[in-house]
Image: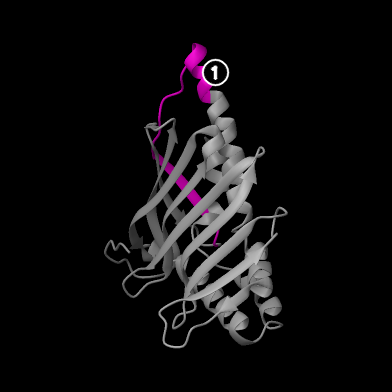
Amino acid sequence: MTLLRKTLAPLLTIGVSISMMPLLAQVSGTSGKLLLAMAANAKRMTQYEWKQRITVVRKGKPAEPIIDQVRFDSSGKLQRTTISAPPEMSGIRGRIQAGVKENVQQIMELAGRYNKPQQMLEFIKRAQVTETPGADLMRLQANGLIKPGDATTMLVNPRTHLASHVDIKTDYDGGPMTIAQDYGSLPSGPNVMKSMNVSVPQKDLVIKVESYDFAQQSSRANGIQPGKNVNP
């Protein structure tokens, strides 16, 4: 599932690229604060490595998961090393497996589009922001970002201006598709995606992504001091 793993890259953090900083300067108020916080968080994320478990559940039955070691190299590019993966099947089961893979890859590619840096910038600029004084969360909501009728809702910590949860409602192959992403902060570290569930009822498919065993990379790998494993 090489393509599946590649499509997960934008889903690791809610963030915008540091290279987009000139564009961020054009956005003011709450939206500007959100974008600047997300850009800074994305930069901090490059100092970490972690494991990621990807499980495809078809007709209520989970397949053997893919487990990757994930890190950023010195140029900030994401690198993945597979620790374990399900074996390839042959015959009828192999053809079924290939069909499921194709659906999963297309589904995750669509999910990834909603989390690309340029898309996040557009979401923040267009979103209706609901702030309640004294509340622990503020709500951002925008429609029609990728497809007509889709809806993206983000809950944000008003103190850190970083996401705690994202819900996306869209469609795939003529049926509904939902994406739920949960985020949390590492101790003295960045805000990270803890889990993501993508559900496509029409295909009887659920794709679960879990990130865990976060640790600062070694000084040799990324120019920082090594640290202990931490989890959200």
Q: Position of residue 45 (x, y in %)?
A: 46, 66
Q: Quadrant of the C terminus?
A: bottom left
Check disc 1 and report the residue beneath it: 95
Determine the secondary structure under disc 1: helix
User: Which residue sits at x=67%, y=64%?
Assistant: 118
Kindly give the residue lying farthest to the top in the view shown: 91
User: Which residue sits at x=46%, y=40%?
Assistant: 206
Apparent side of residue 73 relative to residue 60 in the rendered image (left or right):
right
Residue 95 forms part of the magenta stretch: yes
| Quadrant in the picture for residue 123 | bottom right
Of 75 and 39, the residue lying toward us: 39
Q: Position of residue 180 (x, y in %)?
A: 48, 55
Q: Is residue 111 above or below residue 58?
A: below
Q: Position of residue 121 (x, y in %)?
A: 65, 69
Q: Position of residue 99 (x, y in %)?
A: 57, 25
- Magenta region: which residues? 76-97
User: Which residue sits at x=48%, y=16%?
Assistant: 93
Mark 1 Cα within 10 Å, few/some/many (few <14, many 20+)?
few
| Quadrant in the picture for residue 200 | top right
Question: Tag 1: residue type?
Answer: Arg
Residue 176 forms part of the magenta stretch: no
